Amino acid sequence: MTETRNLLIEIGTEELPPKALRRLSEAFADGMSQALDDAGLTYEGIQPYAAPRRLALRIRALPLAQQDREVVRRGPALAAAFDEDGCPTKAATGFARSCGVEVEQLDQLETPKGSWLSFRAVEKGKATAELVPDMVHRALAGLPVPKRMRWGDREEEFVRPVHWIVLLFGEEVIPASILGITAGRETRGHRFHHPQAISLASADDYVSKLCDPGHVQVDYRARRDIVRKQVIERGEELGGKALIDESLLDEVCSLVEWPVAIAGQFDEAFLDVPSEALISSMQDHQKYFPVLSHENKLLPCFITVANLESRDPEQIRAGNERVIRPRLSDAAFFWNQDRKTPLSERAGDLRNMVFQKKLGTLFDKQERMAKLAAGIAAQIGGDPAHAERAARLSKCDLLTHMVYEFPELQGIMGHYYATHDGEPDAVAVAIEEHYLPRFAGDVLPQSPVGQALAMADRLDSLVGIFAIGQPPSGDKDPFALRRAALGLVRLSIEGELDVDLEALLEQAAAGFEAGIKAGEAVRDVFDYVMDRLRGYYQDNDIPADVVEAVLATRPVRLLDFDKRVRACQVFRELPEATALAAANKRIANILRKADQPVADTIDESLLTDRAEKQLADQVAALKPDVLELMEQGNYTAALQKLAGLRDVVDTFFDQVMVMVEDDALRANRLALLNELGALFLRTADLSRLQH
């Protein structure tokens, strides 16, 4: 059995960027995994560790050396290696000399392409300890660090200054210099609880020794669970429940090595300020966890996570209570000041906020959105006047103190301010809802006016930016058009809004000045939105061939598109599906190769063959019901009816020659196939289904 050891790698640093710590840790593990695979070294697993002052990996069951491997070098072809007398040519002797052997010691390699001289040798595997330093260098160089820094008078660069390196292979230190630091077996404990060096006897001592006496919980996931558990417990002790934002939990976990959650309170008078503003202040500025009542009302409490066990935790609590008061006072000041100016009086100032240089200001965008939103609202059961009013106020809260300080509250504060100004509820709600969905999986607008305004905002951005020739490219998407397009998809399909996307894009284009030539961008935007459907359905586990089958028919209503997809997915599982998909493919090929125009009608007098007459009769019998079902959007039932044609379609292709010499018969049979294919194409191009 191959002897193995565990390998420990630790990079000790100044405090690493908290928002990047998890990503750096995962990238370090991925980089080392790739390096080990490239070297042909097997291992049982890689355990990443990450804390504010360290990135570490423990690689389990790593062999002491690479496996020996056979190396085969191919030389000249036999025909070129020996002359007519069988004597070695210069090509053969030169190859043998390069291999360090005589020609007689070479082998022959037989391949389908011929015979060759070859040399076989065993390459001895290198010791793992020799390979590790270079692997670590490569893995660290590949970390996603936008800007590296230098420290002192060193030439080395890293995300933060490096103070110690641990490289332990079992119980042995691997001699190496990493980022200018000599590797050893000494790590460091908590900056305050145990600043002294901790000597590790082996790689397996790492977690336990850092925990005790080091006071460092180095396992990121375990530390995250500890933070979550403590925060939940403090919330329950306060008679409520902690509001735990996952991204904040990651950030706090990346700020502490030895987490201790401590509860605090603030003046109840601050609860007169909208809770979203208080929560943003606590989460974004202070990294606190707010506390809600069991009725989801904000309580005058918070939970902070200290990075040490204090002998006097009351001092920490009091200090944090002192710090939070001015933050909440700022929020209260913004709230009181902003309400002195109605949203409607701020609209004119949007003329000074550029949306896009060629497309004008946010005031111009609001005006375009107003007309478009009113038209959409009329189609989906909303009040056009409310939609128009909401559009003209939709961006005004961007000029408030509160949104300037907390940009994530855009729309939310607009809702509060519009309500304070006495605007209709439908208008106030729509101002907040028009930003939804903000990200994948986010909730959708629920009110018709909010839905109309959300669509109008996205349609205007998509058409305008495409019209000036700045569509998303690669990773660059400064106007978040991918998210806007996906938002339109979700609003239409999940919101069940039966609107004509192409027509709406035309309406959006009509709102721009003639010089923008927005009408020319409509088709590109339509195709761009339709292309987002591939990813949308992939995320919903719909087979790609089903989506492609529907895309081929280019429906203009996304809700109708979804109904067709669902119908095709059901049809795909029917026993008749394979045969009919093949038949549709055959029909498409025949019609494409036809060297004459295909008639729109079938001449029954020319149906001479029994099989073609049966097919024509059944198509004629089914057609009215199928068309009615499709008109109702019941594509599933329509395709199930068409599945009943399988036997007559199979018989037709078995017994009838379509491309006969007789022009009239050939034209009539092409017309029959065209009518049959057109029925299926009203739902999807079934020839694209894979089986």
Image: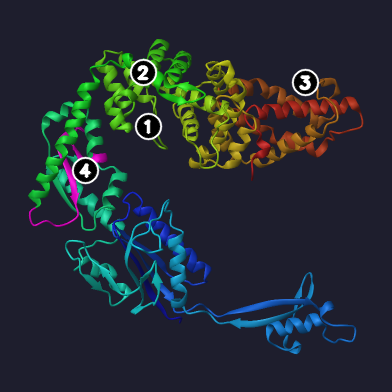
Range drawn in magenta: 283-312
Which element is circle 4 on? loop
Residue 288 is labelled as 4
Residue 128: image location, x then y, percent: 46, 76
Q: Quadrant of the C terminus?
A: top right
Q: Which one is closest to the eye, mark 1 or mark 3?
A: 1
Query: Circle 1 is placed at which residue position?
Result: 443
Marks 4 and 1: in contact by CB < 8 Å? no
Q: Quadrant of the N terminus?
A: bottom left
Marks 2 and 4: in contact by CB < 8 Å? no
x 82%, y 28%: residue: 669
* Residue type at tag 1: Val
Q: Which one is closest to the eye, mark 4 or mark 3?
A: 4
- Labels 1 and 3: the sequence-earlier one: 1
- Labels 4 and 3: the sequence-earlier one: 4
Query: Circle 2 is placed at which residue position?
Result: 349
Q: Which one is closest to the eye, mark 4 or mark 2?
A: 2
Q: CA distance from mark 4 to mark 3?
A: 71 Å
Please name whichever residue, 317 or 333, is drawn nearer the observer in this view of the structure.
333
Q: Is residue 304 magenta?
A: yes
- Labels 1 and 2: the sequence-earlier one: 2
Please name whichever residue, 134 or 258, is drawn nearer the observer in this view of the structure.
134
Compared with 166, 225 (above or below) is above
Compared with 528, 245 (above or below) is below
- Labels 4 and 2: the sequence-earlier one: 4
Compared with 298, 387 (above or below) is above
Which element is circle 2 on? helix
Q: CA distance from mark 1 to mark 3?
A: 47 Å
Residue 247: image location, x then y, percent: 32, 45
Residue 600 is labelled as 3
* Residue type at tag 3: Asp
Residue 596: image location, x then y, percent: 85, 27
